Amino acid sequence: MQQNFQDSLAICKEYGHPDLFVTFTCNPKWVEIQRALASAGSTAASMRPDLVARVFKLKLDAMMSDFMKKDVVGRVIAVNYIGNLHVAVYTIEFQKRGLPHAHIVLWLAEGDKLVSTEDIDHIISAELPDKENDHVGYEAVSQLMMHGPCGEANPRCPCTINGKCSKFYPRPYISTTTMDSDGYVLYRRRDTGITVEVNKIHLENRHVVPYNRGLLVKYQAHINVERCNRSQSIKYLFKYIGKGPDKVTAVMERTDSRYNGPTVAAYTSQEVQLDEVKNYLSCRYVSSAEACWRIFENPIHHREPYVQRLYFHLENEQEVRFYDDDTLPEVLDRVRSDGTMFIQWLLNNRRNETGHDLTFVRYPTMFRWDNSGKFWAPRKQKVDVVGRMVYAHPASGERFYLCLLLNVIVGAKTFEGIHTVDGIVYPTYKEACFHRGLLEACFHRGLLESDKEWNMDLDDASHYATSPQLRELFVTILIFCEVSNPAELWEKHWTALADDIQYTHRRLLQLPMLVINDHDKQALGVEGEFYFIYDHGGTCKTFLRSTILCKLRSEGLIVLAVASSGIASLLIEGGKQLIPDSGYLLT
């Protein structure tokens, strides 16, 4: 998923943000499925997931053909240095009940982009058609594109949270389609008086999911069509990267009284006897339709054009793969030190004059990588391909700076030539980046070089983060990021902490309690003094202690806060528990 996600972003980088986002959901009532079920003597589509998978694949292929060849929503092409090509990405997901659906992202040609509200109304509608003038369209929308009833009308609906629809239905009436400053579209939803009855509740245009009439009538399925103008839509295609796959929690119990195994208390007050298997098994959930889809080897992800992943490495840091039982001579005989994609690019630049004007990313447009022979071969004809270098994190050091250089250097023949600028060979790729001005271009006027990026992070965090969170952020930046001036970062960190102190100090002065200045005098003097703070709950005793600690620590003093109980120590920032009669601290 991660690799496919980055491949899709490479397409966005090459051709800009997508124009249309289409969600195509399988309809178990399709005539093809019902006819096959009847001939097989079955009635439920869930009993034949193989039929569901096959029919949906046929429908999806037909829809993609309509997009690519018949231009049903406009010309799905983009223009690049080769010519016109089709650009589209889709991914397949499966609902818990088993039905597959496809998320499709399309790029439209310049003349067919939806730049005005009239263009949007021509492709996308969010209203019920007139039943008398367009009976076919009315039936399709009323059966397939209505959201609800939900919210207060149906509290048991899955989308209802705290009495409101999590999808923001019903939407407000609006006389004309509008776009806000961010390009987000509010589709036209007029109060036409046309309604449809669903579960004894009348729904109107405010409950219609945006659709395209031609696609809806032809494929008779839930097909949500939305205009998008940001590459962030690609993230939705790969949301399972963060969510993880669907999971099911299984409980294995045994209530036989003759069983003498261990007993574990269940969620109810009654004790149940469990077998020797673990109490709970958290498993990946694969529906029957998804299993059939994968058995048939149907693609989960599809993209056009092809994306060539380009791997690179530092000198003498090639990746070598071997089996556990391989001997060193066997590894050396099998692995070629120059058999990597990156080294062959350098060697090919020495042997072949063609491609000297191409960067590493553009190289696949004229050469193809032969993975079996480990070499770059000239293409006999130009093809649609997008090159993408594998990701390098800024904390990866020299590898990250090598990646920056490879985006601009053409015709490199050696590793040394990559970090050579104006005839001067610099010892590191980072220094070469500085002298080429790449860091200024990539990090907006030298954010990385002057630590402005990290200062901005600390400045933003100071508006919402607490003192411990700011300290944690500061340490994280020092450990994992390239910091050229830690003292400047500490100054920024201390300033944010001092601002926090001023705020808490102002609040403290409003309380009928001790003034913090008295504590400052005792803490900074040679002799201390004992204070006993006693009052009922809710009088800000913990707030007073935290403010005193924060004030002293902001001045560079080391303050150790201890408490006799674990709960009390947790209430103090950086608090430690003192074990009675032992002299030890629990940290």
Image (cartoon, helix red, strand yellow):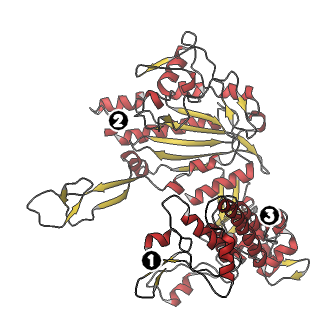
Quarter placement of the N terminus? bottom right
Residue 223 in sight from this viewpoint: yes
Q: Amino acid at mark 1?
A: Ser
Mark in front: 1 vs 3: 1
Tell me the residue at 63%/35% (across/down).
226
Q: Amino acid at mark 2?
A: Ala
Name the image quarter holding residue 500: bottom right
**Relative side of 532 to 107, left or right:** left
> Observer-nearest residue: 46 or 516?
516
Q: Give the residue at the far top of this rendering.
A: 132
Question: Which residue has dot 2 on it?
Answer: 45
Mark in front: 3 vs 2: 3
Q: Secondary structure at mark 2?
A: helix
Question: Which residue has dot 1 on it?
Answer: 564
Count residues near mark 3 (Cα–Cα under 10 Å), then give few for <14, some for 14-19, many for 20+.
Answer: few
Question: Which residue has dot 3 on it?
Answer: 442
Q: Give the residue at the far right of this rendering.
A: 422
